[in-house]
Image (cartoon, grey):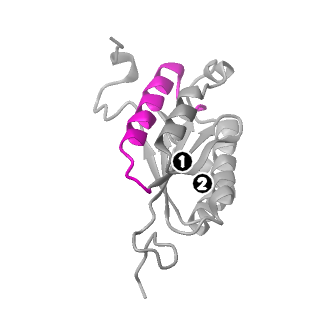
Amino acid sequence: PNTYSNRIGNQGQPQVLSMILLDAIHTDWINQNFAQRAVETILRQIEPGERVAIYALGHDFRVIHDFSSDRQSLLNEIKAYHVDPQLFLRDLRFNGDDMRYTLDAMKALADHVKGVPGRKNLIWLSVVFPPITNAQFASSSMNEAITALNNANVSLYPVDPRGVLGALSPQAITMK
């Protein structure tokens, strides 16, 4: 009672299940490069036996690579991944359509992994995250997405691929 584990069956070692979601809707073209490099760095550090899956969020949910502990295969897929350039022709703000795409993707991801036993960690790489405190977005769709993730044993970790920016605005950051 009150003990939680990623262990499957009677295996001696807990199974680590990690998922990475590349958010092309809320991450501009320049920051997509940061995101892909961040994923490559993460993949180079996975431990033997750790299983990782890579997904993408565009106007729909996409599986780039399902769970695998084959580091080279995961790296090859992330290097081959390209974002539709049409996604970058708009502002990076949450609007109704973007919120719907995001919530639908979270529900699709939860549905995709709900049969995989164990606790799953989802690293959501994005520059813009939904304004949870905004009453406009506190909807039944958001509750459904949260419930779906919980029911699939998914812990969500939103991460900005640019790193910690402090008080700097995006306009103050220059690429070298």
Q: Main secondary structure of the magenta part?
A: helix
User: Magenta span has 41?
Assistant: yes
The residue shown at (43%, 88%) is 1
- Is the residue under label 1 in contact with that under label 2 (CB below 8 Å)? yes
**Which x, y percent locates residue 112?**
67, 56
Task: Let me know if residue 130 appears in the view.
Answer: no
* Range of magenta residues: 24-49
The residue shown at (65%, 66%) is 115
Q: Is 160 placed above or below 20 here?
A: above
- Foreground: 164 or 1? 1
- The image's mark for residue 138 is 2
Task: Let me know if residue 168 appears in the view.
Answer: yes
Position of 153 with respect to 5 (left or right) is: right
User: Magenta span has 56?
Assistant: no
Q: Secondary structure at mark 2?
A: loop
Report the amino acid beneath label 2: Ala
